[in-house]
Amino acid sequence: MQMSLLSNLEKLGPTTILVISTGSSPLTDADIARISTLPNVESVIPTLRAVTKVPGINQEVTLVGISSRDLSEILGEIRLDEGQMYVDAPAPQSVIGHNIAYDPTTGKSLYEAGGLILVRLGHRSIPLTIVGVLDSYGSVTAVSPDDSIFIPIDFLKKAAHKFGYNIIVVKATDVKVVDQVTETLTNVYGGRA
């Protein structure tokens, strides 16, 4: 597996490091457990991301599998325009970004809480119940919340037949130790990082 380590991403905050799987082998629960025991690691957030198409939206959309607790940690807070946050269960539910719910050019409503949204995973279309619509965030993270669909990570793993993760967000305990944590991750993963 080939991975890249990106540190000090301004938009994610000065204590955040992304571990990105760029090879065919995903990051696993064992990687999550291992990274969480490293010195100066405050938290480890597994995510599974896929690019998808949605009816009525011309550009590709990012589908992000993440727990609701972890999404709150990444965004700082979950601000909903309507509805509620999904329950962390392997169920076809979603919280959609502002630009998915509303046309960014016209402001016209495209999708709303309580409705369904179809996403393509491979050759299949999967209906997701929209339980919430995020308020507009702008670009605050490595993935734009406004242009993404967030779903429970266990549901995405099941629906996509995936057993791991392609991005892990690692939060260091302090900005002063980010380089040290990055070096430790590189040493732990050797040629894989």
Image (spheres, grey):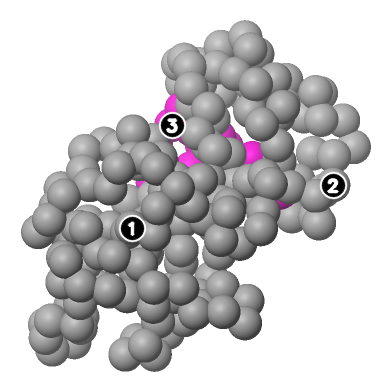
Identify which amino acid the numbered label 2 is placed on: Met
Real-space CA distance between mark 2 and mark 1, rounded to the nearest whole angstrom: 31 Å
> Which residue is labeled 2 in the image?
1
Residue 14: give its label.
3
Can you give x and y, in whole percent of width and height, for residue 150 in the image? 37, 56
Disc 1, SS = strand
**Among the two numbered marks 2 and 3 on one chain, the one whose residue lies closer to the N terminus:** 2
**Among the two numbered marks 2 and 1 on one chain, the one whose residue lies closer to the N terminus:** 2
Q: Is residue 96 above or below residue 77?
A: below
Disc 2, SS = loop
Can you give x and y, in whole percent of width and height, for residue 139 in the image? 32, 58
The magenta stretch spans which residues? Answer: 5-21
Of 50 and 112, which appears nearest the observer?
112
Asked if the residue under mark 1 is in contact with the one under mark 3, i.e. CB atoms within 8 Å, the reply is no
> Which residue is labeled 1 in the image?
93
Of 120 and 92, which appears nearest the observer?
92
- Whether residue 180 is visible, yes or no, is no
**Among the two numbered marks 3 and 1 on one chain, the one whose residue lies closer to the N terminus:** 3
Can you give x and y, in whole percent of width and height, for residue 165 in the image? 63, 46
Residue 38: give its label.
none
Real-space CA distance between mark 2 and mark 3, rounded to the nearest whole angstrom: 27 Å
Residue drawn at x 60%, y 18% as measured from the top left: 36
- Whether residue 83 is visible, yes or no, is yes
Identify which amino acid the numbered label 3 is placed on: Pro
Q: Is residue 142 above or below residue 5?
A: below
Residue drawn at x 77%, y 29% as measured from the top left: 186
At label 3, counting other C-alpha atoms closer than 10 Å, the crowd grade (few under 14, some 14-19, many 20 or more) is some
Identify which amino acid the numbered label 1 is placed on: Gln
Q: Is residue 123 above or below residue 187?
A: below
Residue drawn at x 48%, y 17% as measured from the top left: 42
